[in-house]
Amino acid sequence: MQRIDSHQHFWKYDAVRHSWINDEMAVIRKDFYPPDLQLLLVQNNMDGCVAVQADQTLEETYFLLELAKNNPFIKGVVGWVDLKANNIHEQLAGLSKHKLLKGFRHVLQAESQDDYMLQKDFLHGIAALEQYNFTYDILVFPRHLKYVKEFVKLFQKQKFVIDHLAKPLIKDKQLEEWELDIMDIATNANVYCKLSGMVTEADWHNWKQEDLNPYIDVVAEAFGPDRIMFGSDWPVCLIAGSYKKITGIIQNYFQSFSIADQEKVWGGNAVSFYNLAAS
């Protein structure tokens, strides 16, 4: 079974385009390209990865596709397309010719309207994805989950995955409301969840495994071993830990699970969700 990092990023750093990288995140205020990640994957027994958009342009999508084409360990790309475009079907038909393009993401967490995902023209775009076998990554904060519940129920056959556990407030040890929402959303069998981005929601410099376990408990119970997947969120994770520490979180938590279930979390679920090619 392939071990797949289901969530990481590449970028050529630009101060304007990447203005979200503030002074506290100075360690990632630079370029990150495939050679920077490849050695880390080898060192941590990972076979490949899925590159996810960080910039909301079609240029970003083609940038990631070009990297994937030239670096076989990049097994798939989650890009960006304007889902509200009038010609969305035409765009998706063209993009579907790129076999390494597996799905799309929009930075919903940054929109001024928390219910942006429920706007009619955005829903029109989401409705078109299934026809082309594209997945959709949901990037939100806990306050958005009440809208995510309604959103995913509208598309029972569309493959969705929640990025970063919906960014629970781990540092503040807030659990209950987030847990209720996650448990509700997980009743939709077409929704998966990435065990990614946890350390950046915890105390960056003082987090411990014990801080994260209650949140992994919720996701493991809600989605089960068939619908959760490991993601590093590299290089963003570097602001709060090394790649080895990030993989260690999952290794420590799932070591008591069956080998079959561990293989699903480490890569099997990512392969099936994103329809990744065999090594």
Image (cartoon, rainbow, N blue to C red):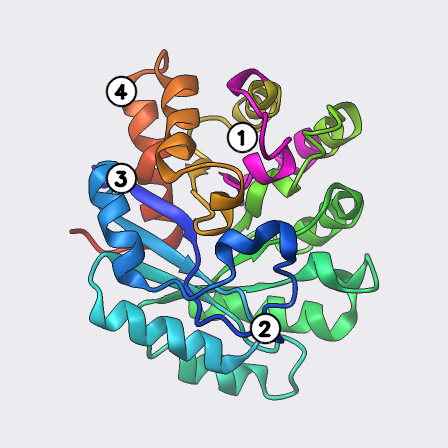
Residue in the picture at 75% in, 49% down: 150
Q: List the residue tagged with mark 2.
A: 15
Identify the element where label 4 is drawn: helix
Contact flag, marks 1 and 4 (Cβ < 8 Å): no
| Residue that numbered label 3 is attached to | 3
Kindly identify the amino acid type of the residue bearing the numbered disc 1: Phe
**Residue occupying the far top of the picture:** 256
What is the crowding at mark 4: few (fewer than 14 residues within 10 Å), some, or many (at least 20)?
few
* Residue topped by disc 4: 259
**Which portion, as a residue range, is magenta?**
182-210
State the image coordinates of residue 35 (x, y, percent, origin top left): 25, 60
Which numbered disc flags the more N-terminal residue, 1 or 3?
3
Any part of residue 158 in sight: no
Residue at mark 2 to residue at mark 1: CA–CA distance:
38 Å
- Res. 96 image quadrant: bottom left
Relative vertical location of residue 140 with respect to residue 167 in this rendering, above or below: below
Q: Quadrant of the N terminus?
A: top left
Vertical arrangement, residue 71 with respect to residue 28, above or below: below
Residue 188: % across, % down: 61, 40
Count neighbours of disc 1 (C-alpha within 10 A) and say few if under 14, some if 14 to 19, many if 20 or more.
Answer: many
Near-viewer residue (86 or 6)? 6
The local secondary structure at tag 1 comes to helix
Three-letter code, disc 4: Ile
Q: Amino acid at mark 3?
A: Arg
Disc on res. 27: none
The residue under label 1 is 223
Q: CA distance from mark 4 to mark 2?
A: 44 Å
Q: Residue furthest left?
A: 279
Q: Mark 3 to mark 2: distance in Å?
A: 33 Å
